[in-house]
Amino acid sequence: MTDRPRTPLLDRVRDPRDLKRLTDAQLRQVADELRAETISAVSVTGGHLGAGLGVVELTVALHAVFDTPRDRLIWDVGHQAYPHKILTGRRDRIRTLRQKDGLSGFTKRSESPYDPFGAAHSSTSISAALGLAVARDLGGEPPDGQGIGDCIAVIGDGSISAGMAYEALNNAGHLGTRMFVILNDNEMSIAPPVGAMSAYLSRLYAGEPFQDLRAAAKAAAHLLPPPLREGAKRAKDALKHLAVGHGTLFDELGFSYVGPIDGHDMDQLLAVLRTAQARADGPVLIHVLTKKGKGYAPAESARDKGHATNKFDVVTGAQAKTPSNAPSYTAVFADALIRQAERDRSIVAVTAAMPDGTGLSKFADRFADRCFDVGIAEQHAVTFSAGMAAGGLRPFCAIYSTFLQRGYDQVVHDVAIQRLPVRFAIDRAGLVGADGATHAGSFDVAFLANLPGFVVMAAADESDLARMVVTAAAHDEGPIAFRFPRGEGVGVEIDWDAPPLEIGKGRVVREGSGVALLSLGTRLQEALQAAEALEARGIRATVADARFAKPLDRDLILRLARDHELLLTIEEGAVGGFGSHVAQLLAEEGAFDRGLKFRSLTLPDTFIDQASPRDMYATAGLNAEHIERKVLEVLGAKVMGKRA
Ligand SMILES: Cc1ncc(C[n+]2csc(CCOP(=O)(O)OP(=O)(O)O)c2C)c(N)n1
Ligand SMILES: CC(=O)[C@@H](O)[C@H](O)COP(=O)(O)O
Ligand SMILES: [Mg+2]
């Protein structure tokens, strides 16, 4: 149990209006207390720590200067918004972050009027803020009845590497309406940022003093009430030492570029924000320099600057470990790929800003020139991989299921239609836990298995995953994907030297009669448990692992249909995926006409909020007891009691 920090001034802040009654010195104190409260809260919940610590002063300053929630403040990704949540009436629930029935780890419209636009995937904030600004200009009336004031997007240096951000800047510069983009530049993505844009932002630190800004700060000082003038004057003095290039990219795009300013210096922040708020007549980009993990030594010194953390001890920074002996699926993928790459020089790997999350940092350690971190740019990652495939390489494009959604047209248009052999390693398939609905890998099977010529596999355990990597490496005929979940495997021994799988062939793992459970992916263990429970009731279930959502193992499926009264499919994906394809096959082959009972267990038609993966699967009705219950229900057998 961690002691709660003393936060006398923060205790008086019930909502952002209270900040407006405080002096600049008091705002600095609120920021200090807010930082302590954020650290304390995340120590008991785990979560995204570093990004929030880096924007504590910015959060206080934005809420002190702007009139939220009428002014619409949009945090890109939303992983840095814990301090914002504390200031906006959610402090009493802050220790429920990312827990079942608790606060979301991201911004969420349904959670608070202070979250005008939800997020969790990056680089959407400028588009959303611009949309709100245009709605304001055209007299739009949001349902909250507050009207729309200023629209402010806060976007990180990592997130501004994505195409969407440029599409939005381009449009905003063209429309010329008043809006604010705060570029929160901490020289970090999850990993150190990559790319030419990141280098460009760094060069902006090294230009000449920005005369206009100093003049603006001076002018603003006169606009301010006397107690605030001193802070503005100090900021003006500080700004003498600031530097910026003339004619920045942002200026050229139609923004007034301001900065860079020190995002931990409350005086600078307040002065510049007040000035910008008082004077802006078009789009303004304020470049703020911050430190990810600021003010908490273990985060500041961590390789990822405390990007994401388990629960931890505030004093030592030591994180709780999740006990497990099985290797993570991600690690198995990375090791299997490295083995393939040792034998085959044409194998290359691509990640979109997730080198650690996808395991590819390990691959990069071995094959630096064959591993590409393209930044947060999933669309580019896909087409870049397609280009490499067209050039005779064997690219493995490793993207979380949820983020692959952003590259879907590229998957269809650049990969599938051209039948290019890009290998998609789809991590975080299925429900992921604390990150909730936005990060669930629910749709990939549905959106890939309907593409002609695509091979789509799902690993049931870590050994099969290793084999699917081998299979994908050997498959030059067209695109191929394999999906696997977040977390540890089931603990089976891995046969690293197993030959490639035969494309479109599943396996029977338990012979029975009457009932067939056909699983795709890691629900196989649940299906096996369900089969045991059914056995105790005198029902002997066959359990099969489909391995392939496409092409389907027609022989296996038709045999199961022929030899059993009930065929039940189970998958960790939305409707429209594996079960739908099986149903289509069965219908075409007349299996229903012959009296087959068929059911398909999929994720339900709803977005499931964060909880433990097990709890989320319980909500989805995809755990062993649900499989058992479904079988009994269809067979008309009596359900006796509730199994634990
Ligand atoms: C489309 C998309 N791809 C990848 C991610 C994973 N992701 C979350 S935060 C993050 C880094 C963001 O860096 P930055 O915007 O600089 O914010 P910081 O964490 O440095 O504050 C990444 C890659 C995501 N949320 N959305
Ligand atoms: C904010 C974000 O999108 C990532 O930080 C994400 O939370 C990572 O998820 P994993 O922990 O599964 O890598
Ligand atoms: Mg950053």
Image (cartoon, grey):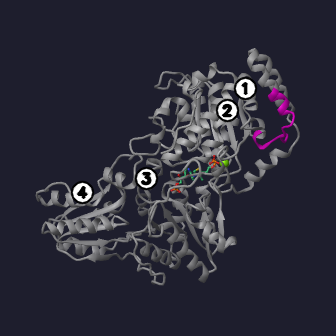
**Callouts 3 and 4 close, C-beta under 8 Å:** no
In the foreground, 474 or 79: 79
Question: Crowdedness of circle 3 by 10 Å Cα count: few (<14), some, many (20+)?
Answer: many
Residue 241 position, x and y percent, is 86, 37
For disc 2, the marked residue is 180
| Badge 1: residue crowd in 10 Å (few <14, some 14–19, many ≥20) | some
Instruction: Decide: few, some or many residues near mark 4? Use Cα within 10 Å; few <14, some 14-19, many ≥20.
Output: few
User: Distance from label 3 to label 4 (Cα)?
Assistant: 21 Å
For badge 3, the amino acid type reads: Gly
**Mark 3 vs mark 1: in front:** 3
Cα separation, mark 1 vs mark 2, equals 9 Å
Q: Judge left or right: residue 585 versus residue 512.
A: right
The answer to which of marks 3 and 1 sits earlier in the sequence is 1
Tell me how far mark 2 sits from mark 4, CA to CA: 53 Å
Q: Which residue type does callout 2 highlight?
A: Phe
Magenta span? 234-250
**In the image, residue 577 above or below residue 105:** below
Secondary structure of residue under mark 3: loop
What residue does disc 1 label?
A: 280
Badge 4 residue CB within 8 Å of ligand 2: no
Q: Identify the residue at horizontal 80%, vertical 42% (top origin).
A: 248
Q: CA distance from mark 1 to mark 4?
A: 61 Å
Q: Nearer the viewer, residue 161 or 68?
A: 68
User: Which-is-in-front pick, marks 1 and 4?
Assistant: 4
Asked whether residue 135 is drawn in magenta, I would say no
Question: For mark 4, what is the residue?
Answer: 644
